[in-house]
């Protein structure tokens, strides 16, 4: 029988930025990498055309396209826009791709080690790297696992009650009706989509062009009491907790997790000398132990 009121603790003092949780999430949900590949049909001097593809408009903006084989091998360009079949790049090809050119679309290095740079329609949790300077002018990295907070009072559920439901464990789930047409705001599809994506204070929901609906972390709901239940220490657990090498992720009954979080906070402050450590979150099913000020993680103030 599934536990009621499940919570997750993410302890950033233990996180090593390995992204095992990110990979496990993709594997469990059968999600592809944030990129694409194929064979060019033709091109202009600043575009690449693949008539076999059906991309969403501007799906690949700011990513890179690399010619891996054939005409133009090893040339790489940044994509500035795309239609359903054509990628427009930022400068002219040295040699225009043709029917022999095999390409790959990849994320673009922008100075951050976060890759992919954020959650997306095919990445439901992403490890964010933030570099900051301490009072001694020394540079540090902090890591943060960006995912849905599974709010107790979810703004997304208010806007799309047909498509967003709450489980008995407290998980906020997007179902097959979580689409722009069911968002309860006036306007056309674009306005409804924009309103829904903007409602979350943590910038979590994304629109998946392939399925035509909104997506996000589902707390691995099917692993709690269902056919695919997976256990750690005799308790159901998420894919990300099961795979986390340093044990930075813990899930379990809410009272146990909050007790563990407070005990760990004391230990981190007193024994590890992280004087600025705090617990962040609390408005949902996820609580973070942060070793630095929340702003250093790119987070808003906790409620």
Image (cartoon, rainbow, N blue to C red):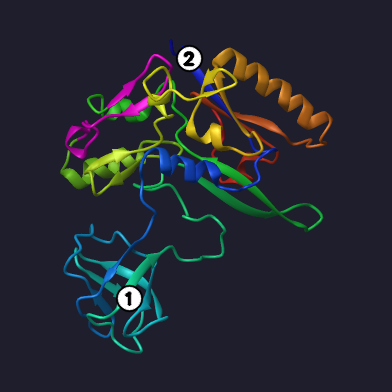
Identify the image quadrant of the N terminus: top left
Decide: few, some or many residues near mark 1? Use Cα within 10 Å; few <14, some 14-19, many ≥20.
many
Q: Is residue 198 above or below residue 1?
A: below
Q: Which residue is mark 1?
A: 89
Q: Quadrant of residue 43?
A: bottom left
Considering only order in the chain, which callout, 2 or 1, is on the residue closer to the N terminus? 2
239 or 47, which lies in front? 239
Residue 113 image offset from top left, x and y in percent: 57, 58
| SS class, disc 2 | loop
Q: Which residue is mark 2?
A: 5
Furthest-bottom residue in view?
94
| Magenta stretch: includes residue 19 | no
In the rendered image, is residue 112 in sight?
Answer: yes
Residue 92 image offset from top left, x and y in percent: 33, 85
Residue 199 image offset from top left, x and y in percent: 36, 36
CA distance for labels 1 and 2? 49 Å
162 vs 252, left or right, is left
Decide: few, some or many residues near mark 2? Use Cα within 10 Å; few <14, some 14-19, many ≥20.
some
Q: Quadrant of residue 107?
A: bottom left
Question: Which segment is the magenta one?
Answer: 164-185
Q: Is residue 155 above or below residue 126?
A: above
The residue shown at (22%, 33%) is 183
């Amino acid at each position: 029988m599934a536990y009621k009121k499940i919570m997750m603790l993410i302890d950033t003092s233990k996180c090593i930025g390995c992204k095992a949780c990110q990979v496990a999430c993709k594997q469990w949900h059968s999600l592809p990498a944030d990129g694409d590949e194929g064979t060019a049909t033709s091109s202009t001097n600043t575009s690449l055309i693949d008539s076999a593809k059906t991309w969403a408009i501007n799906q690949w903006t700011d990513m890179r396209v690399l010619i891996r084989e054939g005409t133009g091998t090893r040339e790489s360009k940044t994509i500035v826009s795309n239609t359903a079949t054509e990628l427009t790049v930022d400068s002219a090809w040295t040699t225009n791709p043709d029917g022999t050119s095999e390409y790959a679309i990849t994320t673009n290095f922008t100075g951050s080690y976060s890759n992919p740079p954020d959650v997306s329609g095919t990445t439901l949790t992403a490890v964010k790297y933030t570099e900051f300077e301490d009072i001694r002018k020394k540079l540090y990295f902090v890591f943060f696992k960006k995912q849905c907070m599974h709010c107790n009072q979810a703004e997304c559920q208010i806007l799309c009650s047909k498509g967003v439901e709450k489980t008995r464990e407290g998980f906020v789930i997007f179902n097959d009706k979580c689409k722009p047409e069911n968002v309860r705001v006036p306007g056309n599809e674009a306005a409804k989509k924009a309103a829904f994506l903007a409602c979350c204070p943590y910038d979590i929901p994304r629109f998946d062009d392939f399925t035509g609906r909104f997506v996000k972390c589902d707390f691995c709901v099917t692993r709690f009491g269902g056919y695919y239940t997976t256990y750690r220490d005799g308790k159901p657990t998420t894919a990300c907790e099961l795979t986390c090498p340093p044990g930075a992720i813990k899930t379990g009954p809410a009272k146990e997790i909050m007790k563990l979080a407070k005990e760990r906070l004391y230990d981190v402050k007193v024994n590890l000398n992280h004087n600025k450590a705090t617990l962040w979150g609390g408005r949902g099913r996820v609580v973070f132990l942060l070793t630095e000020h929340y702003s250093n993680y790119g987070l808003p103030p906790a409620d």
